[in-house]
Image (tube, helix red, strand yellow):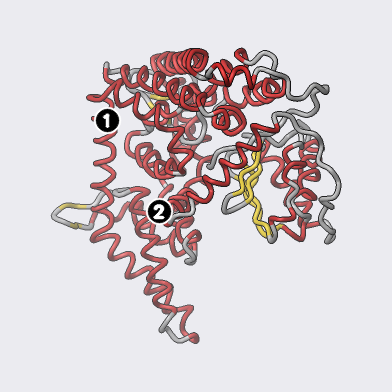
Amino acid sequence: MSSDTHRATAAAILPLVGGPDNVTSIAHCMTRLRIGLRDRALVQEEALKAVPAVLGVVDDDTYQIVLGPGAVARVTPEFEALVREAPPAPPASPAHPAPPATAEALRARGTALKEARAARNSTPVKLLLRRIANIFVPLIPALIGCGIIAGLNGLLTNSGLLPAVLPALAAIASGFMSLIAVFVGYNTAKEFGGTPVLGGAVAAIIVFPGVAKIEAFGQHLAPGQGGVLGALGAALLAVYVEKWCRTWVPQAVDNLVTPTLTVLLTGLVTLFGLMYLAGEVAEGIGWFADRLLATGGAFAGLVLGGLFLPLVMLGLHQALIPIHTTLIEHSGYTVLLPILAMAGAGQVGAAIAVYYRLPRNRSLRTTIKSALPAGFLGVGEPLIYGVSLPLGRPFVTACVGGAAGGAFVGLFNQLGAGFGSTAIGPSGWALFPLLDGPTGLGTAIAVYAGGLSVGYAAGFAATWFFGFTPQMLRDLDTDPDPSPATAPPSPEPAPA
């Protein structure tokens, strides 16, 4: 897609969110343009959903516009440039009618469910999980890039090709992971209101080679001990120490005293407490994940795959981000992500069943056709909020498909064919380049593909036979919009 197209998308979005004067902040994650708004009443949501490149919206702590992987990274700088360069303009008048949209009834239900979920998610625990997610989400692109390069390096090593290039690829793939604690510390301090570079400074202590000379709790420390969990704890402590210092340090010497005390006090606690404790927690997480799948196998996979969609709906999936990152740091990959990805497979299978069970509902079939390609690539939000969740029963049968796929992958883990993902973020077909495991890439790909196939099939079958009551079929298997189809609708996505 050309840069002109991305700029046109940005230009279409800007007036529909109230114009440049209504935008207070701009950021993006894997699939979403995240905008801070002064007045959300100025957003023309229906017209925004009708923009061809927009897959959906989420009204959360920031206003999030789902554009999909790849597209969002190209539209965001164009959007930033328009906000920066454009003269103040009055918001687009809501008096102009929004373009007609299809699947209106389901979208209305999805909107109501989204609002109810947003109200439930405004609890202290969920807000804390969201802030923790904000620390790790900006790191995902680097994790993905380095993970794919690590996989390429493994393939070349096993094949014996290009031996002169292997050390360079190893350095490129490992450099970020060797310093990920510093980035976590920086982002933690930034998220919790401290000075970001001080958070990075105390987290850097964890990866400094010289810590091997320091003894704590009767043993010498190891560089990197505690990893991202230690960095998270150290930077959070630094934020509180810094704020405490600023309450009593005279302003004239604040620039000298506050940074010094922050780094010194937090550094000592990190070296003689946090590194050891966080290291033990990280070891425990790795041991538990290995034992869970080695002994629980199919049952553990069934539970994880079946419950992941409800976790997403409750916002609790964000608690898994530091766990995934810890597992990647500990063993090179996270064994949990391929199993959790089966939830998306069940969702895709359920959507295909809905498509064929409702042959006369052209509006809903258009929604499914527009959202399925993204669903196969692991972006399942449009299918969740635009199809399965508003319908009710198909959401449950989608979870059944996820449980079946998770059980398949879990069984092979128990049989010794364990594997995982070297990065977090992608799922569906997009996860294939990131697979790795002790039994080899071929086995990992085969088991993961088998799990996806089982998830698709089980989600389809469960939805076909149990996803509709006779009354639902009578009500839904009609064409609610006899006019020619216009732009595909853009259902509401689930939280990040």
Question: Dot 1 corresponds to which residue?
Answer: 290
Q: Nearer the viewer, residue 307 or 286?
A: 307
- Does dot 2 land on a helix, a strand or a loop? helix
Q: Is residue 379 visible?
A: no
Q: Is residue 449 left or right of residue 430?
A: left
Residue appearing at x 47%, y 81% in the figure: 254
Return the residue found at the far left: 218
Say what amino acid the circle numbered 2 marks: Val
Q: Rounded to the nearest whole Å, what is the CA distance between mark 2 and mark 1?
A: 27 Å
x, y (%) of residue 285? Answer: 28, 40
Mark sitting earlier along the chain (2/1): 2
Residue appearing at x 31%, y 18% in the figure: 411
- Does dot 1 land on a helix, a strand or a loop? helix
Return the residue found at the far front: 471
Question: Dot 2 surroundings within 10 Å: few (below 14), some, or many (20 or more)?
Answer: few
Q: Compared with residue 179, is residue 369 higher up or lower down, i.e. above or below?
A: above
Residue 99 is labelled as none
Question: Dot 2 corresponds to which residue?
Answer: 125
Q: Quadrant of residue 7?
A: top right
Q: Is residue 188 left or right of residue 234?
A: right
